[in-house]
């Protein structure tokens, strides 16, 4: 009886490995892990960084508070995972931004489309100063203009034109508008940006989200 059990065991064990080998030959392999890209997300306080990242990550956006210091959010897309390091945007934190740039492969800069001219200029200076840093100056950039559901919001193309981003960054920058009321368009912006990070393929570079 023991000998029969042993024979059954060896038969099943050998059969398992045989089936496993056949599946591999046929291409029935476990899916490869998604590639991960390191992204730094900056912008003035109130620009909507925390809210946008929570929304696209499928997290509740109620009681979102401004970021002090930084935190990392994993944005899972169809073809990759963006490890987004969001850095607080208050005046006292902005002078330390450069200490968090290490390892970045792309830059997301968010600006409130409803902000006044003075704040818009402050945001412009903050972005251009950041992009002068040797750790960021050659990286792809996503300029995300938020609060597009508001009547007085500037579009992404308006902000890009006011800031002359094409003159300085040519094809390395893409601008999108966004709103918390349109998650699909927000995903589209992140997916297009991820495509650049993965393949160097430039997607739509001037897209504004209309609600």
Image (cartoon, grey):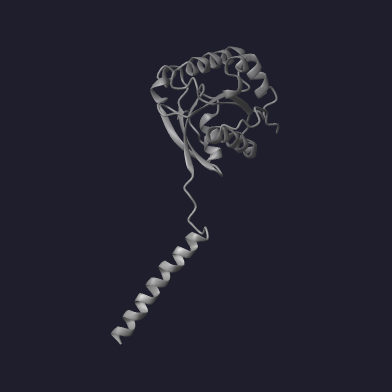
Q: Position of residue 186 (x, y in %)?
A: 61, 35
Residue 110: quarter of image: top right
Q: Position of residue 133 (x, y in %)?
A: 45, 17
Q: For this rendering, which residue is in front, 24 or 168?
A: 24
Residue 162 visible in the current orientation: yes
- Name which residue lies at 49% across and 19% down: 137
- Name which residue lies at 57% across and 13% down: 121
Vertical arrangement, residue 145 with respect to residue 28, above or below: above
Vertical arrangement, residue 28 with respect to residue 148, above or below: below
Residue 154 visible in the current orientation: no
Q: For this rendering, which residue is in front, 180 or 207?
A: 207
Q: Position of residue 60 (x, y in %)?
A: 53, 41
Q: Position of residue 47 (x, y in %)?
A: 55, 25
The residue positioned farthest toward the left in the image shown: 2
Instruction: Locate the N terminus by quadrant.
Output: bottom left
The residue positioned farthest toward the front in the image shown: 25
Instruction: Locate the C terminus by quadrant.
Output: top right
Left/right placement of residue 88 relative to residue 58 reads: left
- Name which residue lies at 52% across and 61% down: 26
């Amino acid at each position: 009886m023991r000998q029969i059990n042993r024979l059954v065991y060896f038969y099943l064990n050998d059969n398992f490995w045989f089936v496993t080998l056949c599946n591999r030959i046929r291409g029935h392999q476990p899916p490869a892990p998604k590639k991960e890209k390191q992204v730094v997300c900056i912008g003035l306080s109130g620009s909507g960084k925390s809210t946008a990242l929570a929304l696209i990550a499928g997290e509740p956006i109620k009681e979102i508070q401004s970021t002090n210091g930084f935190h990392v959010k994993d944005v899972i897309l169809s073809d990759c995972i963006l490890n987004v390091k969001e850095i607080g945007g208050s005046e006292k934190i902005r002078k330390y931004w450069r200490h968090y740039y290490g390892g970045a492969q792309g830059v997301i800069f968010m600006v409130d489309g409803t902000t006044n001219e003075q704040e818009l200029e402050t945001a412009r200076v903050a972005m251009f100063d950041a992009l002068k840093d040797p750790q960021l100056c050659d990286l792809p950039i996503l300029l995300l203009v938020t609060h597009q559901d508001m009547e007085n919001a500037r579009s992404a193309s308006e902000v890009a034109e006011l800031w002359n981003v094409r003159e300085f960054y040519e094809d390395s920058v893409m601008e999108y508008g966004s709103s918390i009321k349109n998650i699909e368009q927000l995903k589209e912006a992140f997916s297009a940006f991820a495509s650049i990070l993965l393949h160097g393929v430039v997607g739509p570079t001037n897209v504004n989200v209309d609600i």
